[in-house]
Image: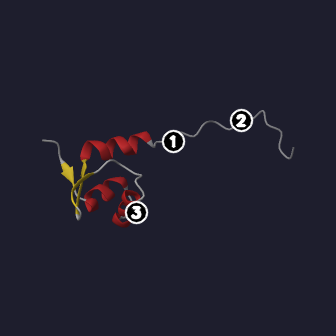
């Protein structure tokens, strides 16, 4: 069976507060979760890692061809 994390563990992996993760869950955004009961939520470690990877932003080089002040 895959490793399941509680809210605090999943939040720590993502570098956010547990309250943020609970807010995301209530808004139906954020990483996938398993609702075992009304008060028992678990996150698959694999889903947390995927969620973080999918949000990775690699800034591009600035466009030096632009004219400033235009």
- Upstream in sequence: badge 2 or badge 3: 3
Left or right: 60 as drawn, with respect to 54 = right
Image point (45%, 43%), residue name: 55
**Quick check: 65 above or below 26?**
above
x, y percent for residue 19 = 37, 67
Which type of secondary structure does the marked residue at label 2 adopt? loop
Mark pair 2, 3: CA separation: 37 Å
- Upstream in sequence: badge 1 or badge 3: 3
Labelled pair 2, 3 in contact (Cβ < 8 Å)? no
Residue at numbered disc 2: 63
Q: Quadrant of residue 35?
A: bottom left
Left or right: 58 as drawn, with respect to 48 = right
x, y percent for residue 38 = 23, 63
Residue at numbered disc 3: 23
Quadrant housing the C terminus = top right
Residue at numbered disc 1: 57
Left or right: 65 as drawn, with respect to 41 = right
Q: Quadrant of residue 39?
A: bottom left
Q: In the depicted view, which residue is nearer to us: 64 or 23?
A: 23
**Quick check: 33 above or below 64?**
below
x, y percent for residue 15 = 37, 57
State which mark lies toward you, 2 or 3.
3
State which mark lies toward you, 2 or 1.
1
Image point (27%, 62%), residue name: 8
Mark pair 2, 1: CA separation: 17 Å
Mark pair 1, 3: CA separation: 23 Å
| Crowd class of label 2 (few under 14; some 14 to 19; many from 20; radius 10 Å) | few
């Amino acid at each position: 069976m895959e490793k399941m994390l509680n809210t605090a563990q999943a939040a720590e992996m993502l570098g956010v507060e547990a309250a943020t993760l609970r807010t995301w869950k209530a808004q139906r955004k954020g990483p996938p979760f398993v609702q075992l009961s009304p008060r028992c939520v678990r996150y698959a470690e694999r889903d947390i890692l995927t969620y973080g990877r999918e949000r990775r932003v690699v800034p591009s080089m600035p466009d030096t061809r632009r004219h400033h002040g235009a």
